[in-house]
Each structure stands twice: as C-alpha cells, then as structure tokens.
C-alpha cells in the first residue's frame, strides 16, 4: 500500500484545521521510533504507536501498558498516523474525532524482535500476520513486549515479556502522568 493511501483513513476522520493535529507527509522515516501518548478523550487510554516505514502503526490501549508479565492488556488497532504525530501534544476540541487532551507519555526507539523458526520477520509483515514482538527503549517503559491479534478484527493483546524491564510492583501508567517532552500533564492542557 502506498504511503498516501495509508493515511487516507486518518485524514478522513479529522478536520485537521480544527483539531490542530499534523496532516503528515512532511517527514520521512529515519528509524524505528515509538511513542505512547496518554489520551484523555471520552475515556482515558494510551495510544501505542510504532514506526513502520513512513507511518506510525497505532493501537489504543485502554488500561495503558503494564510492566507485569502476568497482565494482558487489550490493544485495539486504529488507523495509521503520520510520523509527525509522535510529537503531537494538545487539546483536540469538542466535536472533533478524539476530542480531549493528549500528551507524549513516553517515547524512544524500538527494535523489532519478531521471528519465525529463528528467522527475522519484517515489522510490516509481522503486523499484517497478526503477531509482533519488539523491544522498547523509552524513558518510562523498557524491555520486550508482544502484540498478538485475536481473530480477524482489530483487537489485539499486549503483554510484557519477563525480562529485566519487567516489574510486578511499578505501575507507571498510574503514577507517572507527565509528558516526556514537555513535563506537562493532560490536566495542564484541559
């Protein structure tokens, strides 16, 4: 699928002049970045976004990521977002898609760890086939994670792998509420 086509759904859902969100298309992919945005919309959730080529493949995680390998988190795949969305913070006005406040809760780089029978699988192929394994290097979240699609829909499960980044006691989604870019909270933007 061509890059422009991958952002059609994103652009169709928004009036970008009103929402203040990036239109995309200005920035080229230059690595494997990830971002987790804390989004206080109709319901609080966290948006996990992994750079795959020239877009951010995205999942809404209602309870936020967990560092406890025993936890299974629902992750609903959403439309791809433009790369410049990785720095987006702001207040999306009432009446617009995704209305509410959004901050960059965590960001960094990731490494694709998806393999089948010991052979690496490209990230785009892994997403297409419904199983992604990756290592995050963020400020709040580090270590191995996996996403697996349930059935043929948009619902996936996000788990933390049991490695040095695992912590059964620490709950960063409940205690560390500030942006890693600006130090602001969602409340500051309300």
Image: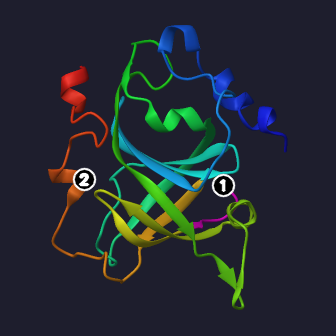
Mark 2 element type:
helix
Q: Residues within 10 Å of mark 1 (few under 14, many from 20)?
A: few
Query: What is the x, y in percent for residue 28?
Result: 68, 39
What quarter of the picture does the C terminus occupy? top left
Quadrant in the picture for residue 41: top left
Give the residue at the far right of this rendering: 1
Identify the residue shown where x is 27% and y is 39%.
179
Identify the residue shown where x is 35% and y is 83%.
163
Q: Give the magenta range.
A: 148-153
Looking at the picture, tell me which residue is in the foreground, 113 or 18.
113
For the residues marked 1 and 2, what is the alpha-carbon distance in whole angstroms?
A: 26 Å
Q: Residues within 10 Å of mark 2 (few under 14, many from 20)?
A: some
Mark 1 element type:
loop
Query: What is the x, y in percent for residue 16?
Result: 57, 14
Q: Which mark is residue 173?
A: 2
Majority secondary structure in the magenta region: loop
Identify the residue shown where x is 72% and y is 59%.
124
97 vs 144: above or below:
above
Query: What is the x, y in percent for residue 159?
Result: 43, 71
151 vs 76: above or below:
below
2 lies left or right of 165: right
Circle 1 residue: 153
Give the residue at the far front of this rendering: 30
114 lies left or right of 165: right
Quadrant in the picture for residue 71: bottom left
Query: What is the x, y in percent for residue 18?
Result: 50, 8
Q: Is residue 150 magenta?
A: yes
């Amino acid at each position: 699928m061509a890059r422009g086509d991958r952002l059609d759904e994103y652009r169709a859902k928004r009036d970008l002049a009103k929402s203040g969100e990036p239109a995309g298309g200005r920035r080229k992919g230059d690595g494997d970045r990830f971002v987790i945005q804390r989004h206080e919309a109709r319901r609080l959730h966290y948006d996990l976004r992994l750079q795959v080529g020239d877009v951010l493949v995205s999942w809404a995680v209602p309870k936020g990521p967990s560092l406890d390998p025993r936890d299974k988190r629902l992750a609903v795949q959403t439309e791809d977002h433009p790369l410049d969305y990785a720095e987006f913070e702001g207040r999306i006005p009432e009446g617009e898609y995704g209305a509410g406040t959004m901050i960059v809760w965590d960001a960094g780089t990731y490494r694709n760890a998806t393999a089948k029978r010991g052979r690496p699988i490209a990230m785009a192929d892994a997403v297409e086939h419904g199983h992604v394994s990756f290592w995050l290097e963020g400020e709040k979240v580090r270590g191995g994670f996996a996403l697996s699609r349930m059935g043929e829909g948009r619902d996936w499960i996000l788990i933390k792998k049991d490695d040095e980044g695992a912590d059964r006691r620490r709950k960063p989604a409940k205690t560390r509420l500030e942006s890693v870019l600006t130090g602001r909270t969602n409340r500051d933007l309300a």
